[in-house]
Structures are given as structure tokens and as C-alpha cells.
Amino acid sequence: MRIVNWIVKNLHLLISLWIVVPTAFIYGSPSILSQQLNIQVNTIDLSNMLKAIMCLYLGISIVWILGIWKTNYWKRATELNILFMLTLATGRALSMITDGLPTNGYIFGIIAELFLGLFSIYQLKKYSQE
């Protein structure tokens, strides 16, 4: 029963890791990026920006891992998850309004980010009272 409680408490962080870590490597790998998201990396500047995003995603993932592994980091990791997911969703929504609809992968992205951001708020409220 203890493992089930641990999984439920950390579910938002576990799902985020499951999505964000592979996404980081896709963003940092131009050949995979062009296959998966129809993005052509034609300049060193774009490649540089995408590798920086890859490392940002991996760095944030380290905080989530710390939150899962060490209970005294859980609240910070959850707050970071809320900020990360909801700001990504806000940026995607802004782009959809100003630029039009993206491919299905990015539409899935906004749905997942909204869900994870809101679910993380729920988790924070639920488990901060313990």
C-alpha cells in the first residue's frame, strides 16, 4: 500500500518526466526533430537554441527527480512543474491565437501541459496539507 501512495503522490512528476525527457532529446537531435515534428534545423543558431532548450528541459527534470526521491524537495518540484507546464501551455495558446493551429503533436502538447499543470495544482493542495 505504501508504494501505491508514493506513486499517487508523485504521479504528476512521473508523467512529466515520462514526457519531458524524451521531448528534450528530440529537440536536441536535429535528425529526429525533422522526422517527429516536421521542423528543419537549417542554421547553427537554431541548433544552438534547441540544444539549450534540451538542457533546460533536462535540468528541470533533475528537480522533478529530486522531488520524487527526496520528500523535502517535493513541494519545490511540484511548484516548478506547475510553472513549467502552465507557461508552456500559455505560450502554445498564444501561438495558436497569433500564428494558427500547429501539427497534432503540438496540439497534444497543450492538452498535456494544461492537464499536468492543473493536476499539479491539485496535488500541491492535496499533499501540502499532510
Image: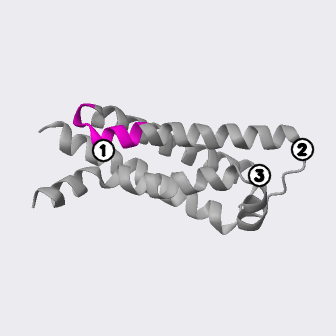
Residue 59, how many percent across, how many down? 52, 36
Residue 58, how many percent across, how many down? 54, 42
Q: Residues within 10 Å of mark 3 (few under 14, many from 20)?
A: few
Give the Cα separation between the discs numbered 3 and 2: 22 Å
Q: Residues within 10 Å of mark 2 (few under 14, many from 20)?
A: few
Of the residues under marks 3 and 2, which one precedes in the sequence? 2
* Residue 7 image-quadrant placement: bottom left
User: The disc labelled 3 sits on which kind of residue?
Assistant: Asp
Q: Can residue 82 be seen by looking at this rendering?
A: no
Tag 1's secondary structure?
helix
Residue assigned mark 1: 68
Residue shown at 30%/32% (left/top)? 73
* Residue 39 image-quadrant placement: bottom right
Residue 122 position (above or below residue 33): above
Of the residues under marks 2 and 1, which one precedes in the sequence? 2
Residue shown at 59%/55% (left/top)? 23
Depth check, mark 3 against mark 1: the one in front is 1
Closer to us: 62 or 8: 62
User: The disc labelled 1 sits on which kind of residue?
Assistant: Ile
Give the Cα separation between the discs numbered 2 and 1: 38 Å
Q: Residues within 10 Å of mark 1 (few under 14, many from 20)?
A: many
Residue 18, how many percent across, how many down? 45, 58
Residue 7 position (above or below residue 90): below
Does the segment drawn in magenta span residue 70? yes
Residue 76, how many percent across, how many down? 34, 32
Residue assigned mark 3: 99
Quarter of the C terminus within the rendering: top left
Q: What range of the chain is rendered magenta?
A: 63-72
Q: Residue most toward the right?
A: 42
Residue assigned mark 2: 43
Residue shown at 52%/52% (left/top)? 20
Q: Indicate left or right for 103 with 10 as reference.
A: right
